[in-house]
Every structure is written in C-alpha cells, then in structure tokens.
Amino acid sequence: MGWYKEYKLVEDKMGYNLIIYLNNEKAEFSNEIIEDVKENILTLNDEINKFVEDKFSDIKINSVKLMLGAMVIGTIPFAGHVKVHAETNSPNQVQAAPVSFESNRLDTVGTVTASKLNVRSGPSTSYSIMHLLWQGNRVKVIGESGNWYQIRLSDGRTGWVSKSYLKLDVIISSRQEKINKVISLSKSLLGTPYVWGGSSLQDGGFDCSGFTQYVFKNVGVSLNRVSYEQANQGIAVARQNLEPGDLVFYSLAGDGRISHVGIYLGDGKMIHSPKTGDVVKITDITTTFWESRYITARRII
C-alpha cells in the first residue's frame, strides 16, 4: 500500500484540508518513539507534493495533516491551487512547507559540552546546518522538541541543537513549573466532595471534568467543560509514556464512550473526582477495573 493507508478531505474556507493516515505497518512509522517517527516523515515532502498533484489537481488544498492512528504527527500548510504535472516547472506548483512540530517553551541557559556542535534550522538532522558552536559556549535556550533544544544565538537567530551536547543550568522550565502547580493544586483539593455539574469551590465541589478544568484554569490553561471534549485537546500520549500532569480518560460503562477523566500523578496513580457520594481522591489505575476501561490520554502542557 505504500506510505499511507487512507485519506479524506475536509471542507475548509475557500478549499479543503487533506488528512492522510500514515501506514503504521511500514517500519519507519511503527516506531513507538514519536521523535523518530517525526524525523522519518520529513522525507515525505516530495511524495506528498506528488500525491496532491496527482489526485487533487482541480481543487484547492489548504493544508495536509499527517495522522498515525488518532495522533497528529505533523501539519503541512499549502498555498494556491494544484494544477500542474510533475514534469512541469510552473510557478503555480505547490511546494510543501517543512513539517511543524509541537514544542515546549523554556527560559534558561546552556553550556556546550561537545568540541564542536552543529546548530540546525529545525529539530532533526534532516535540517540544514546554520551555525557552529564550540565547547564552553553558553547560549540562551528558549524551547525543546523531542531530543532537541531550541536556542537563540547572540545575533538574534534561532536554531536547534541536540540535547546530548548542551548542559542546561539548573532552572525549572516554565512547562515543568506549570505541571508542578497542577499536581500541587489538585492534591490540595483532596477530600472535596463530588458535585454533579460542579466546576468550582463555589459550587461546593466538582464532577470529574469540572475538577480537571478548574485545576488547569488556575495555571492558565483552558480546557473544555466535558470529558469527551477534553479528550480532543492537547496531544495523544501512549499509556506506556504517561507523565505527571497528563489527562487520562475512561469509559466507566465499558462501552468505549469517554465518560470520565482524571489527572495522572505518576507511579500508576491518578487524582480525580469519581462519583456522587465520593470525594476528590487518588486512585491506583493499574487495577483490572481501570485498565479495562482505559480509552486514551492527552498531554495538555
């Protein structure tokens, strides 16, 4: 079948968005380490261009979204109508922009530990080298994506370096600070009564999604009101890759429909507001009951 399994068009303003589901039976897209998968899709730009030109020469494609199962791996913006054949050099030919990746903001400083360190234009070795750093150089670190740090050079340019060769000063990242606040605030609410429809202390307590919405709101993150809508926010996380602060979703009825949400604390535990007559509490989610009702997890921060 090649590099994709199926695709669909979604109507958008003045055109369409194309969603392509990658073939996870191909070795390069079956890796559980998401950073490796993202690096592998960088090789698809030419194939995506040809795919759009061959199949959609008479309509406007605004963007291409690459999916691996239910996970969004990358988004490629397009501009203009695709009307040319592969062998022509028409100025209207669409070129795919580089794949964009999720990144977390940082605000710290790092020291180069390698004798020579390549600074690249993006977070993988597929991107071009734009600068060189030398052992002992100190640089501003402004973000991270996978195994790469985003840095700002002294001339104002930004680039990416491997995490293996940059030692950060011991400063808690803004992301980790938010996660710490989520965990701390959620634990401070232990014992708060379950109240159906409750989403604040003024309501006397919380239901499950009201609890998660309240906690995240207090660290500056907006969540939808109900659990199945919260399950569409952030990025998908495999169960084996859960981290503290991730949202975990369950079908209490066991029918596959999301009806419950909690905040993962680590060590197989979540904190949640369970049901009428109960209170906010910490629960072991490695039991048969919870494992059999698990649906998905999302990383919001």
Image (cartoon, helix red, strand yellow):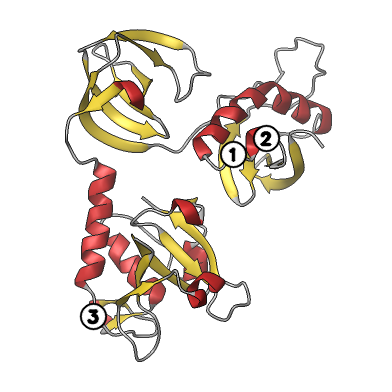
State the residue position of label 3. Answer: 202
Residue at 24 percent across and 76 percent down: it is 190
- Quarter of the picture containing the N terminus is top right
What kind of element bears circle 1? loop
Asked whether disc 1 touches disc 3, contact meaning CB atoms under 8 Å apart, the reply is no
Q: Nearer the viewer, mark 1 or mark 3?
A: 1
Q: Is residue 203 above or below residue 56?
A: below
Q: Which amino acid type corresponds to the residue marked 2 in the rendered image?
A: Ala
Structural crowding at the residue carrying mark 1, measured as other residues with C-alpha within 10 Å and reported as few (<14), some (14–19) or many (≥20): some
Residue receiving disc 2: 27
Residue 218 visible at all: no
Q: Is residue 240 left or right of residue 108?
A: right
In the displayed structure image, the side of residue 291 where residue 8 appears, left or right: right
Q: Amino acid at mark 1?
A: Asn
* Proximity of marks 2 and 1: CB atoms separated by less than 8 Å: yes
The x and y percentages for residue 277 are 35, 91
Mark 1 = which residue?
A: 31
* Residue 217 rendering spot, x and y as whole percentages: 30, 61
Above or below, 108 against 30 in this view is: above
Question: What is the quadrant of residue 49 in the picture?
Answer: top right
How far across and how far down the image is residue 146, in percent? 42, 34
At label 3, counting other C-alpha atoms closer than 10 Å, the crowd grade (few under 14, some 14-19, many 20 or more) is few
- Point 65% across, 21% down: residue: 95
How much space separates mark 2 and mark 1, taking CA atoms?
A: 7 Å
Disc on the earlier residue, 2 or 3:
2
When asked about the image quadrant of residue 280, the answer is: bottom left
